[in-house]
Amino acid sequence: MTNRERIDRLEIEKQLPKEDWVQLLSTFTTEDREYAAEKARKISTGIFGKTIYFRGIIEFTNICKNDCYYCGIRRSNDAVSRYRLTLEDILECCQEGYENGYRTFVLQGGEDGWFTDERMEEIVRAIKERYPDCVVTLSIGERSRESYQRLYDAGARRYLLRHETASPVHYAKLHPAVQTLANRMRCLNDLREIGYQVGCGCMVGSPYQTAEDLAEDMLFMGKFRPHMIGIGPFIPHSQTPFRDFEAGSVETTLMMLSLCRIMIPEVLLPATTALGTVRGDGRQEGVLAGCNVIMPNLSPLSVRKKYMLYDNKVGTADSAADGMARLAAQMEAIGYQVVSGRGDSPRMQG
Ligand code: SAM
């Protein structure tokens, strides 16, 4: 079977046998990638039109109890200046975002024990009270099912938790032994059962990753059918154990994004900050490969440089209004329009 035939088969069957994933992901050519991108783009515009949803990320704490080998804010990085935003800081970010058309706020942070269920509930409730027409998305890592339930009851409706890699052997090469893929998967299943719109995803080109691992990622995502998928290239951070590894390939990232769009047509698919970091026009390329979401940074400028997950992260100097204007211009340049609104998953309107 040729790679084009594999892509056609994926479009019809919405999944491929593992062997075909491995072949496709290890042998695709530029032409194959463009073929997949064109298909993905058509599917995306068929569902969402030439519009791009945007979500504001508020990086509210860079304190983390975890020690992921790839991540710049890992516990063992003593060179990081640590911070926590107050509720007032967070509400100010939301206000600035709201004035600029944002209707989804993504609270992202390290796994910081100071943010107990009570404190997180207070934050979620305060945002929902002040901005009832907005969605609160959480991206705060692994917690108990009870905790996820409490935060849902407080008003959070979406949760981003990348699975990072669906291969347990590969997972163990990226994380200390106390962090397990089994618990990550437990979290994803709990979140979905509670009723969240759930996002999973992985890094492309992370150290020790093989085409088999990427095949496992596609198999898992095809089965789990998340509402959102976050995929970006691994980028080394100079103060982590993975400092000497190379960044992941933009081409493979774009191919994975297109294949996700073809496999799960209605998925909400961001062109990630990491993609925009490894290549200046990476986010535009992401959209042309089938992405339909962009997630600009709404964190206060004073803390942006302290939330460095990887080296040279883009968007650390733009105000909310500048970031929006630049983004709108970038999208217009390729014939797309950013639209305000909640941008819920087509599977979960209302
Ligand atoms: N602590 C939460 C969690 O684990 O889901 C949210 C914050 S975590 C920093 C957000 C994402 O950043 C991770 O899921 C990971 O995929 C990504 N990330 C961390 N370090 C990275 C790196 N060096 N290159 C690319 N992405 C990275």
Image (tube, rainbow, N blue to C red):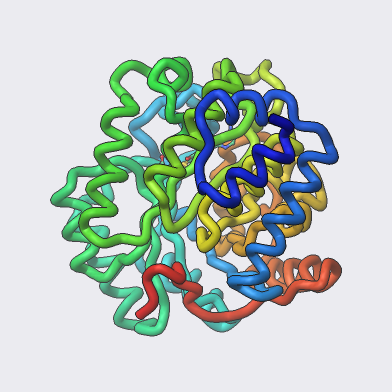
Residue at left offset 51%, top offset 31%:
17
Q: Quadrant of the N terminus?
A: top right
- The image position of residue 248, as x and y in percent, is 68, 30
Q: Which of 28 and 59 is in front in this view?
A: 28
Q: In this view, does 100 lie to the left or right of 180?
A: right
Residue at left offset 32%, top offset 66%:
157
> From this viewpoint, is residue 193 visible?
yes
Q: In this view, does 118 lie to the left or right of 160?
A: left
Residue at left offset 75%, top offset 40%:
278
Is residue 28 positioned above or below 178 on the image? below
Q: Which of 17 and 61 is in front in this view?
A: 17
Q: In this view, does 113 lie to the left or right of 230?
A: left
Is residue 49 positioned above or below 195 on the image? below
Q: How many tags in the picture?
A: 0
- The image position of residue 239, as x and y in percent, is 59, 24
Q: In which quarter of the image is residue 320?
A: bottom right
Q: Quadrant of the C terminus?
A: bottom left
Q: Nearer the viewer, residue 127 or 253?
A: 253
